[in-house]
Image (cartoon, helix red, strand yellow):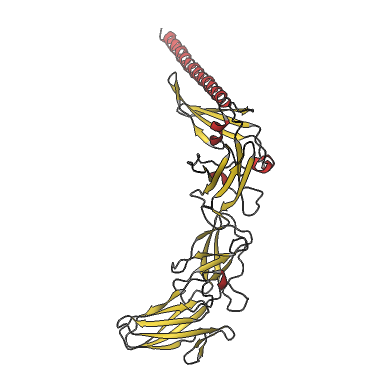
Amino acid sequence: MIIAFTVLLVVLVATAELTTTLLGQAATAHAQVTATDLADETLSQLANEPISQLAPDVNRNVSLTPLAIAGETFDLTQYLHWAGTGAAHSLCVTGSPPQVLQATVTVSWGQGRQGLAETSVINPPYGQAQSTDGWLAILIQSAANPSLPPAGVGAVGVVITPQGGSPLPTDAPDSTGCVYAAVPPGSYTVALQSPASPPFVDAESQSSPSSSNVSVSQGQASDVSFLYDQAAAVTFQPALSSPPLATGMPISVGNSGLTSGALVAVPAGTNGTGPVNLFPYPTGYQVWYGDCPAEAPGNSSDWTKTSPPTTAVQPGQAVTAIAGGLAEIDLAVQTSGAGPVSATAVLNDPHTGLCQAEHYGIGQSTVAGGTATIAAQIIPEDYSVTVTDTADGASTLLSLAWDPTTGKWADTATGNEYAPTSPVPVSVG
């Protein structure tokens, strides 16, 4: 009897395991059939929706309402895009209204989130098509090759706003950098939104490009394009490690692609060196100390205010730009006061009306009834330097002119010249 029961137990256990497996397979098969039916049903619904309703969801993953069937919850996601891949099929390049819209519906279920996807081509006339609509083609171009989209372009937000109306749902470009939208005839404003990371900038190194106005006519395709790419993070530093850089000096960068030829990367008074997000022009940038193109160097002498053009900056690259051409200024301060003594230089800019007024802090030194040297790196120009003993307010005004021929500072009151590393004597109090 023991042997018989043992044999029976073995048979029953094996049968139970087989039954459990069969039931699991049957449940999985039933769920797969249900998921397939849900995907097919959703695709059928999409095929009968008007293009005006489908267009805002092109190139976006859209989560649909979950469905509970026979104790199982099914999650559905749809993705629409205009059929065709590569630049040759880009609607922004061809300029023709799209012919085929491709829809993919993904269904997932179960604790392990099993899933399947169904894809279908939705042929014209896209259900209830609006024959009065026009088309708006928005193309985002890269820095190195405007015929190609920038990497990561799908993260950029494209906002279309009708004149006098509210913005339409934010679009995402397809793999060719194109947003192709069906809209009623009228005037529209198109703006771009940079993702948080990596940041994008336009050709003027602005994260939010100037919006473009465009008119759309019935049955016609109107296009607008943006140069917009991942920014290069550029940090600036002087060529010499000492003495310290005078505080508050602006830094400009130049490139022929910029509207004005140059822009102020680090504003005066910020004491910053970056990093600054710049458009990745393949030709790189020219860098100089100053706050406008009029202060850009005009020669390649030993004291030029620029570094050589940097190597080509790549999208998303971190670059350090070395700006040379600063001159050292040393002040040998003699004071009878308690100190500390500070010095401020005001640039006597010959480009009055073109550049901003510039005030630079040369530095300070704690000195009590004695002599100390204050030194800094500064733009080789003409300055009015004020040296002040902060203890008693006594001050001395010193006028220094830069002689580019000799490469020396000249005290305009005495006519004496001093090499950049030779301290200029000044008495306070």
From this viewpoint, is residue 422 visible? yes
Percent x, y of residue 282: 63, 59
Rendered view: 128 above or below 95:
above
Q: Tell me the residue at 55%/70% (across/down).
A: 288
Rendered view: 207 above or below 187:
below
Q: Tell me the residue at 51%/89% (across/down).
A: 417
Percent x, y of residue 401: 51, 84
Q: 254 left or right of 429?
A: right
The quadrant of the image that shows the C terminus is bottom left
Percent x, y of residue 354: 53, 71
Rendered view: 126 above or below 358:
above
The quadrant of the image that shows the N terminus is top left
Q: Nearer the viewer, residue 206 or 220?
A: 220
Rendered view: 284 above or below 358:
above
Res 345 quadrant in image: bottom left
Percent x, y of residue 220: 64, 39
Q: Nearer the viewer, residue 429 or 128?
A: 128
Q: Nearer the viewer, residue 218 or 3?
A: 218
